[in-house]
Amino acid sequence: GSYSPFTGSHTAQLIDDEEYHYGELVQIQGLIQSGKDIVYQVNKTTGSYQRNVLGAFGYVEDLEFNNTAVSRSSAEDEYMIFVIGDGHILCNGEKGNLAVGDGICSSTTVGQGMKADQMAMIIGIAQEDVSFSGDESKLVAVQYGLQQFTPWT
């Protein structure tokens, strides 16, 4: 038989009217609990090394990753935030290029990840080598997983 990539997610509500793209990092701003159910209230990460990072925005319009933006007013009340398994994080080169096995944490660029160059809460581990030039950002293949991470020496 064959296997498909697995991605686990949390249900979340957007708390602002910003546009969100596939792979952007979001942070927890609150939560709604009803019995055993939890719905996270989120917005894009806003600083580097954030501890309240939840995961990566998971809305995909098509299989070509055209990165069509959605917002709170896009007709859906809740969105999936990818937190475990295979996927992508929108990253930049703020702390350098990425190598397989590097942890990815939030950066100073809103909603984007970067190489974790110090002990930090990460949401993914790079599964590919990625080089950046200038201010560019790229979708990086990752294994999602929230954890405290110590960078390689």
Image (cartoon, grey):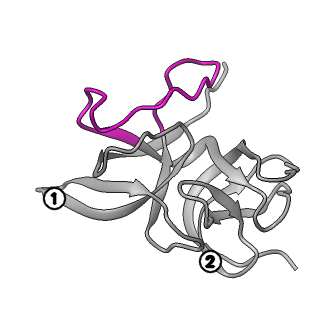
Question: Which quadrant, please, contains the N terminus?
Answer: top right
- The relative height of residue 67 versus residue 122 in the rendered view (above or below) is above
Between the C-alphas of marks 2 and 1, the distance is 27 Å
Report the span colored magenta: 58-80
Give residue 138's position: percent from left, percent from top. Answer: 73, 43
Helix, strand or loop under label 1:
strand
Residue that label 1 marks: 33
- The relative height of residue 29 versus residue 63 in the rendered view (above or below) is below
- Residue type highlighted by circle 2: Ala
Main secondary structure of the magenta stretch: loop
Q: Is residue 140 left or right of residue 146?
A: right
- Residue type highlighted by circle 1: Gln
Badge count: 2
Residue that label 2 marks: 120
Crowding around mark 1 (Cα neighbors within 10 Å: few <14, some 14 to 19, many 20+) is few
For the point 88% across and 80% down, which residue is it? 153
Quadrant of res 5: top right
Helix, strand or loop under label 2:
strand
Give residue 147's position: percent from left, percent from top. Answer: 56, 69
Crowding around mark 2 (Cα neighbors within 10 Å: few <14, some 14 to 19, many 20+) is many
Is 150 in the magenta?
no
State the mark number for residue 81: none
Is 59 in the magenta?
yes
